[in-house]
Amino acid sequence: MEKKLTVAIAGNPNCGKSTLFNALTGSNQHVGNYPGVTVEKKWGFRNFEGTEISFVDLPGTYSLSAYSEDEIVARDFILKDKPDLILCVVDASNLERNLYLFTQIRELDVPIVLALNMVDILADKGYEISAKELSEILGVPVVATVGNKAKGIDELLKTITQKSWIEHMKAHPPASVDYGDDIKLEIEKLQKVIAKDSKLASYPKSWLAIKLLDNDPVALDIAKKSPLAAEILAQNEKSRHHIEEHFGETPETKIAEYRYGFTHSVAKSVIKKLPQKKRDWTLIIDKIVLNRFLGIPIFAAVMFIIFAFTFSVSTPLVELFEQFFAWLGDTAAEIIPEGPIQSLVVDGLIGGVGGVLGFFPLVLFMFFSIAFFEDSGYMARAAFVMDKIMHKFGLHGKSFLPMMISTNGCAVPGIMASRTLDSKRDRLITMFISPFMICGAKLPIFILFISAFFSKNQASVMFLMYIISVCIALCVAKVLSSTVLKGEPAHFVMELPPYHIPTLKGILLKMWERGWMYIRKAGTIIVLITIILWAGFRYPTIEENPDMSEEEIASVQIEQSYLGRLGNFISPVVKPIGMDGTKTIALIAGLAAKEVVVSTLGTLYSLGEVDTGDEESTKPLQEKIATDPEWSPLKAIAFLIFCMIYPPCIVAMAVFFRETGSKIKWLLGLLIGNTIFAYLMAFLVYQIGTLLKLGV
Ligand SMILES: Nc1nc2c(ncn2[C@@H]2O[C@H](COP(=O)(O)OP(=O)(O)OP(=O)(O)O)[C@@H](O)[C@H]2O)c(=O)[nH]1
Ligand SMILES: [Mg+2]
């Protein structure tokens, strides 16, 4: 029979857990060089020499007394699901701090294997470490690894499946922190009381006692549920009091002090300086990019370079894609006889979905640049330099990461990433503002209008839009934090990881992962909605009037269709913001997925177009929009501002609802609040622009 083993991968944020998890299981979990990438546990499997191993990749955590939502996920799994073994990952270049978590896991009395990761970075810093010595001191197996190069993986698997180690650890408990005689005495006293409750026996006794002394909320909760709660808590108070009297310090401080003393001495004895210290590039680069005056301009420049790079590299490819879809449309029109099927294929699928796919190269390059940015380690710096500004708006730098994650791909992981924030208030505000960012799905809408009306300054206008989205998000944060969500932002603790030169494989993988999502979405939900909208704009068919020109027929057909009539009904409401009814329908349909805004416009223009018999009747969508008198640069800007602010897609709303604790009031706030806000902003832009005769 096959052996089964559940292994939890635990460790500090950004120490390389997901990278190791991917290497161990062949999965493709998201990794990034900033703390808080994984916020939910992920399962992966591996069969190794007859053992079926289930690995669980956990969010990073600094301690087992968790505060933020993602840390709670990690803690609960370790405590409640009781894995057979914990693969404790430590960042060797930051050993002392990383071992702090080890000291706590160790007290849980579960077998531990230590993965000494990032030994390459330690070497770069000019140090070396002996895994063997560390193993001897700690009494647990230690394997040196370099996660992103998949070094040490086989050895890790061998160690994990080696039963003899587990037996050994059971017989010779690994080294733990020595809390000194006084505290030990109190631990024993508490343990005696705890032992009276047989239910509490499932918890490692010394763990519960230490945690109670440590005033840990989880341990207190457990104790409160015991029938002996009163006795346990009374003893705890007595012991805590005693320690405080004795040391003149709180037990929390004292316990942490002992733990740090332990990790410090362990780190000191296993890490040796190499004769030649290499230059520490992280320090040098940080001197410049974190400079008080240069920090923000550099960040802005980095973003600008990303846009400039993306647009310049992808423009020829986008043109190629567009030509392809134009050719495809023309060919399909020739092959398929005139009628509803032809219209469905040419106007609906090729005109609509093709419009979304046409921008694929640009989206792909954008993802490429952003993946580079994520993996290099600069992202955490961006949060750091934004900290000061964010404080003025009632938030702090850490909230900037979810915003960046939304910009870099999707508001869903953005909203999820707010789990890393410590306070509920900060989390809520961040979840509210993340959807304002220009996500990968909104990107094609922006590209469409920017290339239609601002083809000479695409990167600059895109950059401006990006800045506007950040400003809007910050202003909303300010309003929320001075009204419904009053309070001070929690303290900002964020680690700045060392810079890495990203691996090409890592970047290409990420680019493909997100790019594939774009294509998959285009092939499924967007096709579906496009077909529905196509039908809505094409039926019921009108009677052909011989007096009308073909063009008139096409436009009357749209006007008289179900959706056209609905559009007419809406149109007075949206006129003050420079829109008409049919375009509003595109926006409403965009609630299903934002790319649908583009596909709907594609279908609409394709339906309204008349085959002139020319060889090349099909123009790219942006050209059709640019030459349509119904549009103007000002209307386009108002439209984009509306797109930026109005409620996110349905998937993002569902995740928002769940992550805000399934409270309907927040969801309604998002839905109604953002719609009104989007309308007001588009109104201001359009009306002021019209008054000043800007781009009309
Ligand atoms: N140089 C070097 N980089 C590594 C190593 N292991 C992982 N990385 C990189 O370190 C960064 C963080 O890796 P992740 O696997 O996302 O870290 P994590 O521990 O899962 O982080 P959270 O999910 O935020 O807790 C990524 O950029 C990896 O490519 C290593 O051994 N050496
Ligand atoms: Mg991770």
Image: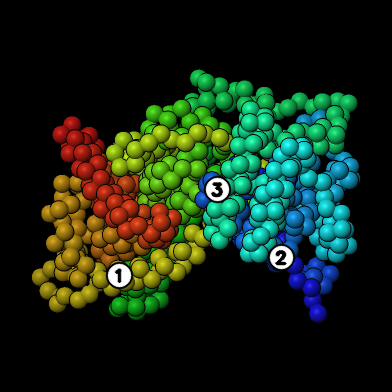
In the rendering, at what x and y percent does residue 194 appear? Answer: 65, 55
In the rendering, at what x and y percent does residue 69 appear? Answer: 52, 50
Q: Amino acid at mark 3?
A: Pro
Q: Find the distance from the CA under tag 2 to the CA under tag 1.
A: 51 Å
Q: Nearer the viewer, mark 1 or mark 3?
A: 3
Residue bearing the label numbered 3? 217
In the rendering, at what x and y percent does residue 153 appear? Answer: 80, 55
Residue 450's quadrant in the figure?
top left
| Residue at the image position 39 percent from the left and 29 percent from the top | 392
Residue bearing the label numbered 2? 6
Describe residue 608's horizontal placement relative to residue 283 as left or right.
left
Identify the element where label 1 is drawn. Answer: helix
| Residue at the image position 12 percent from the left and 74 percent from the top | 546
| Residue at the image position 75 percent from the left and 71 percent from the top | 4
Q: Which mark is residue 534?
A: 1
Query: Relative to the observer, which residue lies in front, 690 or 370?
Result: 370
Q: Amino acid at mark 1?
A: Trp
Identify the element where label 3 is drawn. Answer: helix
180 w.r.t. 194: above or below = above
Q: Could one spot residue 528 in this view of the protein? A: yes
Q: Residues within 10 Å of mark 2 (few under 14, many from 20)?
A: some
Precedes in sequence: disc 1 or disc 3? 3
Label 1 residue near ligand 2, CB within 8 Å: no
In the rendering, at what x and y percent does residue 16 appear? Answer: 69, 47
Q: Find the distance from the CA under tag 3 to the CA under tag 2.
A: 27 Å
Q: Are marks 3 and 2 in contact (CB under 8 Å)?
A: no
Describe residue 170's horizontal placement relative to residue 68 as left or right.
right
Q: Are marks 2 and 1 in contact (CB under 8 Å)?
A: no
